[in-house]
Amino acid sequence: MPIPPVIYEDDTLIAFDKPSGMLVAPDRWDKTRENLMGLVHDKMGHGVANVHRIDADTSGILLCTKEKSALDFASGQFQSKTVAKVYHALCVGLPDPELFALLDPDEAEDLPAPLQADEFLINRDLIDDETQPGRMRTIRKKGKASQTIVKVLERFAGFTLVECRPITGRTHQIRVHLQYVGMPILNDPFYGDGVTELKLSQLKRGYKGRVDEKPLISRLALHASRLTLKHPVTKLPVTISAPLPNEFEVALKYLRKFASAK
């Protein structure tokens, strides 16, 4: 399998547009399963190292460095929560109006900027789910502090397109947080409702397509779209972007055409 598309590269950084379904690093239980860094090391050598990770089911930006000093500098920014990350997700359901209520003053002080119109904060600790290994769950206190800012971009009949800006970077954070507020991501095998699909026949009246119709989007509808950090050499901000995958765009095209909220 070829290496995923390179969406940014210079002398010290390289970023890939990882497809949904591909692991970033070797699986702890199945070492033979193909992964992005295995492909990169085979083609580009072991000097290239990933700075962070994203879920196998999530598509989008995976940032790597080409030298140790750059890795240390970039990793430090992720650890100190100074990297600005933007994800896009297509959620099942619509946001509860109460989510947009005014924040507790203590919560507002911790935000990088004041919330804007159609934004809300999910502030809920996460812990490992003891009943389902490999998954996370929310807890009121005494877990790992986790915060996600969510901006509603578009409302459809039964679905919502959101932009998520995680302040912390916990495992499955966006997925668990959106489930917690009643807006699970479409096609989430861990935290979704296990029922909802998005098919053209649901949206278009008088649909006369195939009997064995396939969903417009069948993968987890979560994409790492943009990240901004200080460059290891220039120390100036650099922004890397990854366009929405084609089936994500196709799903949005038909939602906008047939299911826009009135």
Image (cartoon, rainbow, N blue to C red):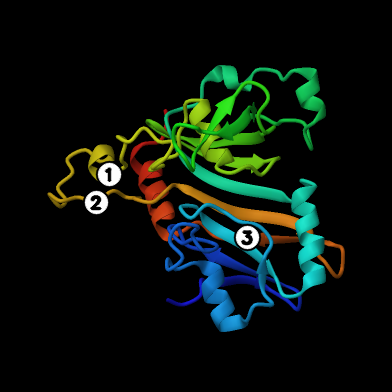
Mark found first going from the N terminus, 1 or 2? 1
Q: Position of residue 161 (x, y in %)?
A: 49, 39
Q: Is residue 98 above or below residue 144?
A: above
Q: Which residue is mark 3?
A: 241
Going 35% across and 46% down the picture, which residue do you hit? 254
Residue 134 located left or right of residue 199 = right
Q: Nearer the viewer, residue 235 or 35?
A: 35
| Residue visible at 76% across and 66% down in the picture | 71
Q: Position of residue 168 (x, y in %)?
A: 69, 41
Q: CA distance from mark 2 to mark 3?
A: 29 Å
Report if the CB atoms under discs 1 and 2 are less than 8 Å apart. yes
Residue 5 in sight from this viewpoint: no
Q: Are marks 1 and 3 in contact (CB under 8 Å)?
A: no
Q: Position of residue 134 (x, y in %)?
A: 49, 43
Q: Is residue 126 left or right of residue 181?
A: right
Q: Amino acid at mark 1?
A: Lys
Q: Quadrant of residue 191?
A: top left
Q: CA distance from mark 1 to mark 2?
A: 7 Å
Q: Which residue is mark 1?
A: 199
